[in-house]
Amino acid sequence: MTKRLLRIWGGAMMTLALLTLASCDSAKRTNYLQDIEVAKAYGVKHDVGIVVQKGDKLRIIVSSLASPELALPFNSRLAAPQSTATSVRAEALLKNGPTVAPVDTLNSYLVDADGQIQFPILGNVSVTGLSLEQVSEHIRNLLVGGNYLKDAHVVTSFDNLRVYLLGAFEVNRTLSGSQAQLLDRGSFHLDNAQTNILELLSRAGGLSDQADYSKLSVIRRVGREYVYYRLDMRSKSIFDSPAFYLQQNDIIYAEYKYRTRDTDQKVSMALGYVSTAASAILSALAIISVLKR
């Protein structure tokens, strides 16, 4: 009888040990780039950069040192009066400082279905397929070639560079109230047109401890089709992926490995059973010990 009770006791202790080991294993499961080597250079195979697409919004500023007054007509939108509704940028302070996409303003130029923008004085300007630097150079050439400005300086940036975050991201778990509503409205704003997946995760607070780090998906629209990429954030193989550098409107989905509520309930139940069994065993052993005397 005593041996049987001891076997039960041993099983209970083994269960507790397995639960402890499982909790310790989570640290290894949530480490990034586990196979990376110190002081070794890793090249990125796919660095094509972002080009302008239909539906993008561009912020374009023209300046001139020699004749600043002549540059004003090409910035007429910047000087236009703005209502409160169009001038306010809806920004939600997320963990580590990222913001949601700004509300549309009069300062931006929408790339229409024909791949063109309506630029002051110049009229229709085709910009699709060009990088930001190429757009700036193209407009500068039009201004100089048309004798509008001899020393035109043009700066172009995206006004709606955004990606979408779904699933087990830390920022999705921690936001609440108005901040969560702003994020749900559409977009996670990127300040840099050359943002990689590691930089995005850093700004979003990283993947949550519920995420499956081996299954981070990037869904990207290419023309009229969607391309699906799978990243294992535990591996250096991410540097070889076409999805390492993000494109506008990418959808990044972090799969859940488990749900906190379900796991907590299972662990609590298991610990409860083990605790009850251990108490019963200890009581039985105490009674047997007393009887043997």
Image (cartoon, rainbow, N blue to C red):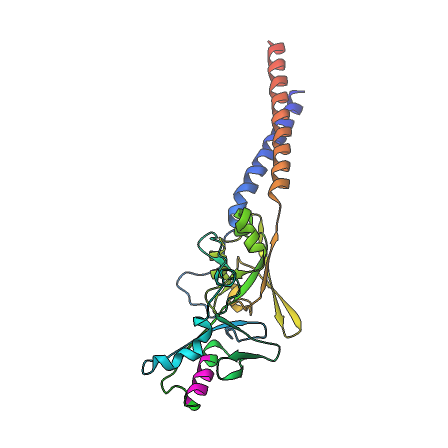
Q: Is residue 15 visible?
A: yes
Q: Quadrant of residue 79?
A: bottom left
Compared with 247, 96 (above or below) is above
Q: Quadrant of residue 23?
A: top right
Give the position of the N terminus as an image quadrant: top right
Of the pair 210 and 89, the residue shown nearer to us? 89
Give the position of the C terminus as an image quadrant: top right
Q: Residue at x 55, y 72 (%)?
A: 56
Q: Is residue 29 visible?
A: no
Q: x, y (%) of residue 212? A: 59, 53
Residue furthest toward the top? Answer: 293
Q: Quadrant of residue 270?
A: top right
Residue 143 included in the magenta stretch of the image: yes
Residue furthest toward the left? Answer: 66
Q: Residue at x 55, y 38 (%)?
A: 20
Q: How many marks?
A: 0
Q: x, y (%) of residue 24? A: 52, 42
Q: Residue at x 64, y 32 (%)?
A: 269
Q: Which residues are magenta?
A: 136-144
Q: x, y (%) of residue 131? A: 49, 77
Residue 62 included in the magenta stretch of the image: no
Q: x, y (%) of residue 123? A: 52, 83
